[in-house]
Amino acid sequence: MKIPLTDLKAQYSSIKDEIDSAIQRVIQSGQFILGPEVKAFEDEVAAYCGTKYAVGVASGTDALHMALLACEIKSGDEVITTPFTFIATSEAIAKCSARPVFADIDLKTYNIDPVQIEAKINKKTKAILPVHLYGQPAAMDDILTIAKKHNLKVVEDCAQALGAEYKGKKVGSLSDAGCLSFFPSKNLGAYGDGGMVVTNDPRIAETVKALRVHGSKMTYQHFTHGFNSRLDALQAAILRVKLKHLEKWNEQRRSKALLYDRLLSQLDGIETPFVEKDVKPSCNYYTIRLKDSRLRRDELRKHLDSKGIQTMVYYPLSLHLQEVYKYLGHKVGDFPQSERAQEQVLSLPMYAELGEGQIEEIVRVIKSQIKTEIKNQT
Ligand SMILES: *Cc1c(COP(=O)(O)O)cnc(C)c1O
């Protein structure tokens, strides 16, 4: 039995007719760049997230970059973010010529620790960029309180968290701007790249709208250098079909996560994902942590792989230790929680169509490997 980390074909076969006709509709229309499909999808995502505006762009990375530019992040500024995320998060900061400043995570949630944020604030600090990692919302109340106190912008990286809720509100709607990714493996995945900025701030929406078309508010009138970064009309049409299923798919992911939790809770040495109360995660990834030092994560990975079970480590090297950030002058030990997470986390197969029998099989394989490991070492 092969079990992939995520199964995009299973999802497609469940909605094939709707998808195929949406693609045909766009091809027949001849309108491939922006136009009615993109506009309709933007309106639908704004309504879904509970924001006034949504602007479709070419990727989640571009969404972050343009949202930060719209918040007037520029050379000499500092933006505080987590070292335990995908490079796109800090890359967006650096691409604004600003300095990414890392603050360690809370190992319980893998998200940026508000206590660590306060210690990093100085006169140059302009914004906080929390990531809702694996689909678990960051500690937004504390983050927004800190931001208000120091007059900072907050931009949420919601790439893994579309549909997740924090105290009854969708992530992305909680701060100045939320950045979405439609990379195929995300909760709402396109058949290619795509991204979006959601916001309640009309100036941010207008600026991102202009930046995505070469810094232009009127055709051939340019107030700044921008980007060629639009959400493709074909992808928008596909995503409109999928958006209608997103709540159901996320609910199915949450119920798979509960089954994993229940089966894995009997195992010593394994930490299952923590879920804050008043929070609904989007469960983009189901990530466990091997907190018993006798359990070797990479051996477990190999063993699962030999049984046809695909896993992934998000992320094996914290950003402060990446070559590209040598200029920030960090060393091993600077962010101990993030470094511990990089050694101990393992993401297991997670998608709406994942079968209960498959989850039982995965847990059975984990159990037998853990028993062997512990026996060999005692
Ligand atoms: C996927 C991802 C991004 C980037 O999104 P793209 O659409 O691939 O550019 C940014 N941040 C995080 C946390 C992600 O997982």
Image (spheres, rainbow, N blue to C red):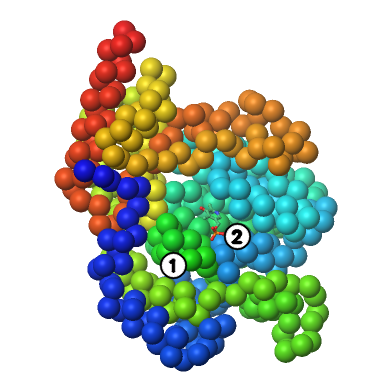
Name the residue furthest bottom: 29
Q: Compare residues 65 and 199 and report the one nearer the observer.
A: 65
- The part of the image, by quadrant, that contains residue 101 is top right
Q: Is residue 138 above or below residue 61?
A: above
Percent of width and height locating residue 160: 46, 55
Q: Amino acid at mark 2?
A: Thr
- Name the spot of residue 335 as percent of width and height, x first: 61, 32
| Residue tagged 1 | 191
| x then y, percent, for residue 204 | 66, 73
Rendered-image quadrant of the N terminus: top left
According to the picture, the residue beneath numbered tag 2 turns out to be 61
Q: Earlier in the sequence, mark 2 or mark 1?
A: 2
* Camera-side residue of 125 and 213: 213
Q: Residues within 10 Å of mark 1 (few under 14, many from 20)?
A: some
Q: Could you say which is closer to the camera, residue 282 or residue 306? A: 306
Dot 2 beta carbon under 8 Å from ligand 1:
yes
Figure check: 283 above or below 21: above
Q: Is residue 149 visible?
A: no
Q: Residue at x 56, y 62 (%)?
A: 60
Q: Residue at x 23, y 25 (%)?
A: 368
368 left or right of 285 in image: left
Whole-number angstrom distance, CA of label 2 to CA of label 1:
17 Å
Residue for point 52% across, 36% down: 316
The residue type indicated by label 1 comes to: Tyr
Which residue occupies the extreme top position in the image? 378
